[in-house]
Image (cartoon, rainbow, N blue to C red):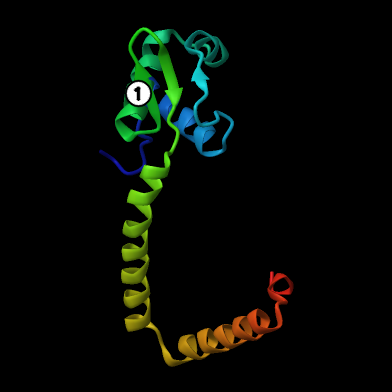
Amino acid sequence: MDPSQIAQTALYQEVAERLRQRIFAHQLAPGARIDEQALATDYGISRTPLREALKVLAAEGLVTLRPRRGCFVTEISEQDLDDIFPLMAMLEGRCALEATTRAQPDDLARLDALHAELQRFAETKEIEHFF
């Protein structure tokens, strides 16, 4: 494909992206039922590309399709959080390792100064003044 050409995306992909953005912005709240007819009308499309978009979002875990009940924005449970946080901690630790192995001396000096300032604020209970 010529890099100067604009790639066309399928309609369902565009709809999936719009819905994804609405979910991330909490315009579609966790647990909320997705009204297919209203969305199709709002977007000026038939329900077929909307349903294809919802299948994509279901595969990503953003929505839950319930037979004969409809489609709902997925809610994160306490168990989900218990599963996610250890993984996040591991990834963040690895990111910190990678960052420090690439850091230059002036980067480390700025981090040391920031750390000292945060410690001072924490000791004086004035952390809200930092932000």
Residue 98: image location, x then y, percent? 32, 75
In this view of the protein, which residue sits in the foreground, 6 or 78? 78
In this view of the protein, which residue sits in the foreground, 4 or 56? 56
Residue at point 50% right, 12% down?
Answer: 40
Residue at point 29% right, 30% down?
Answer: 59
Residue 121, quarter of the rendered image: bottom right
Residue 106: image location, x then y, percent? 49, 90
Give the tally of numbered discs: 1
Q: Where 84 sits versus 29, above or below?
A: below
What amino acid is found at the position of numbered circle 1 in the picture? Ala
Q: Which residue is mark 1?
A: 10
Say left or right for 31 vs 63. Answer: right
Say left or right for 29 vs 57. Answer: right
Looking at the image, the residue that sits furthest to the left is: 1
Q: Residues within 10 Å of mark 1 (few under 14, many from 20)?
A: few
SS at mark 1? loop
Say left or right for 34 vs 90. Answer: right
